[in-house]
Image: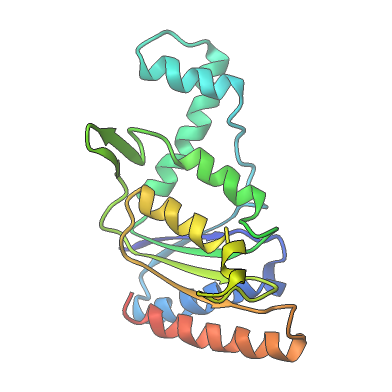
């Protein structure tokens, strides 16, 4: 049975353009693989653990064979559970809106919980290498404005560039995506049109995912 982890990074739920496109992808994928096990994780609903002083100390002490305090162990174990859930999936879907030219802060928190050496990436004399390999990812992006490649506006896009850099860093090489834009800059009719087009494209990608 295929395990698909669907991570939503918007608190807007059904009003989110990114989630609408990602939902269309998941629905089409379910038609292709009715036995798929889909786990939906909205980072604004989840009680994500803090990666604070105890978790940091626990991570480094336990990684070096040094005795950690009960508080440090407990804090790091909460982070490990997030990492283990992430790595357990076979396929991944992400709904990622743009916030202030980047990704929502709760998704950044999730990235910081997941990205740890020896767990999702490693390094040697040749540099870094990802450990989450051989798994495809689909990302639905949305943003209020437009940031076309080759224009000065492209330089403001720290959303798609950052998130796909993260995915590549931890090992993903098969990454497909759709972008819903502009969701605000062109008015509601343009937003509805672009949303519909992205949903159709997402469903098409899902059929060969």
Which of 172/40 is in front? 172
Where is residue 21 drawn, in percent x and y? 56, 77
Residue located at (48% from left, 28% from top): 77
Where is residue 172 drawn, in percent x and y? 33, 56
Quarter of the image with the C terminus is bottom left
Residue located at (52% from left, 40% from top): 112
Which of 31/188 is in front? 188
Instruction: Specify the farthest residue to the top.
Output: 67
Residue 1 position by quadrant = bottom left
Where is residue 204 drawn, in percent x and y? 41, 85
Residue located at (32% from left, 51% from top): 171
With 38 as the anchor, is 54 left or right in this view? Answer: right
Instruction: Specify the farthest residue to the right.
Output: 187
- Coloring basis for residues: rainbow
Q: Is residue 29 above or below residue 114?
A: below
Where is residue 116 drawn, in percent x and y? 42, 35
Residue 19 makes an appearance in the image: no
Q: Is residue 27 above or below residue 88?
A: below
With 47 as the anchor, is 132 left or right in this view? Answer: left
Q: Is residue 6 above or below residue 60?
A: below
With 46 as the anchor, is 189 left or right in this view? Answer: right
Residue 128 position by quadrant = top left
Residue located at (29% from left, 34% from top): 123
Q: Is residue 72 above or below residue 193?
A: above
Residue 164 makes an appearance in the image: yes
């Amino acid at each position: 049975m295929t395990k698909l982890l669907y991570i939503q990074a918007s608190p807007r739920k059904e009003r989110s353009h990114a989630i609408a496109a990602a939902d269309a992808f998941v629905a089409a994928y379910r038609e292709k693989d009715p036995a798929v096990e889909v786990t939906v994780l909205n980072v604004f609903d989840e009680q994500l653990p803090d990666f604070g002083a105890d978790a940091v100390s626990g991570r480094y002490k336990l990684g070096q064979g040094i005795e950690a305090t009960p508080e440090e162990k407990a804090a790091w174990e909460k982070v490990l559970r997030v990492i283990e859930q992430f790595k357990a999936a076979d396929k991944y879907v992400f709904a990622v809106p743009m916030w202030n030219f980047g990704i929502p802060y709760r998704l950044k928190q999730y990235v910081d919980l997941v990205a740890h050496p020896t767990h999702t990436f490693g390094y040697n004399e040749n540099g870094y290498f990802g450990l989450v390999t051989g798994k495809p990812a689909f990302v639905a992006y949305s943003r209020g404005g437009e940031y076309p490649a080759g224009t000065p506006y492209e330089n403001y896009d720290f959303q798609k560039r950052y998130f796909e850099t993260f995915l590549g860093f931890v090992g993903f090489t098969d990454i497909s995506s759709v972008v819903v834009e502009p969701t605000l800059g062109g008015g509601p009719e343009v937003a509805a049109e672009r949303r519909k087009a992205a949903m159709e494209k997402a469903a098409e990608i899902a059929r060969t995912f």
